[in-house]
Image (cartoon, helix red, strand yellow):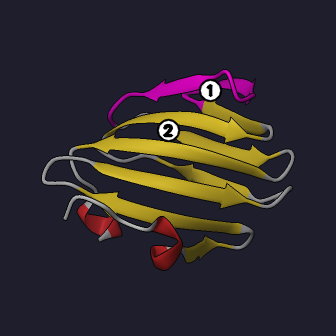
Amino acid sequence: MSFINTEDIEREMLPGARARFIHSENMTMSLWRFEAGGNLPEHSHPHEQMTKLISGRFELTVDGETKEMTASDVAVIPSNAVHKGRAITDCEMLDVFYPVREDYR
């Protein structure tokens, strides 16, 4: 499939957080909407991840380093890095994972 309407695939993942997942053969892309105050619990996974904040402000901690992200920031999260986050304002973000996140299919 070449084109996907992401509004048709949105689902609630956590309190205050909704996501839309798109999978290719080797990668997963996720589009997140967080309400202000929404938390992303501490976790890790074997996938490499890049996170781009699209709008709003989001506090992200990766391996103990914390950054308040704005729309000009990208976080590169290595495989197995412990990370967590908190939406300071309503925000939207884009995550890209390699390899594909089978757990999100």
Q: Quadrant of residue 77?
A: top left
Q: Position of residue 82 (x, y in %)?
A: 49, 38
Estimate how packed mark 2 is, as few (under 14), some (14 to 19) or many (20 or more) residues with alpha carbons within 10 Å.
some
For the image, the number of numbered tags is 2
The residue depicted at 75 percent of the width and 36 percent of the height is: 59
Element type at mark 1: loop
85 above or below 3? above
Q: Are marks 1 and 2 in contact (CB under 8 Å)?
A: yes
State the image coordinates of residue 69 (x, y, percent, origin top left). Answer: 72, 28
The magenta-colored residue range is 62-79
Residue 1, x across and y down, in percent: 19, 65
Q: From the viewer's perspective, is 22 left or right of 86?
A: left
**Residue labelled with disc 2:** 82
Query: Which residue is at a point 56% across and 25% down the rendered structure image?
Result: 74
Does 98 lie within the magenta span?
no
- For badge 1, the amino acid type reads Gly
Residue with the mark numbered 1:
64
Left or right of 54? Residue 96 is left
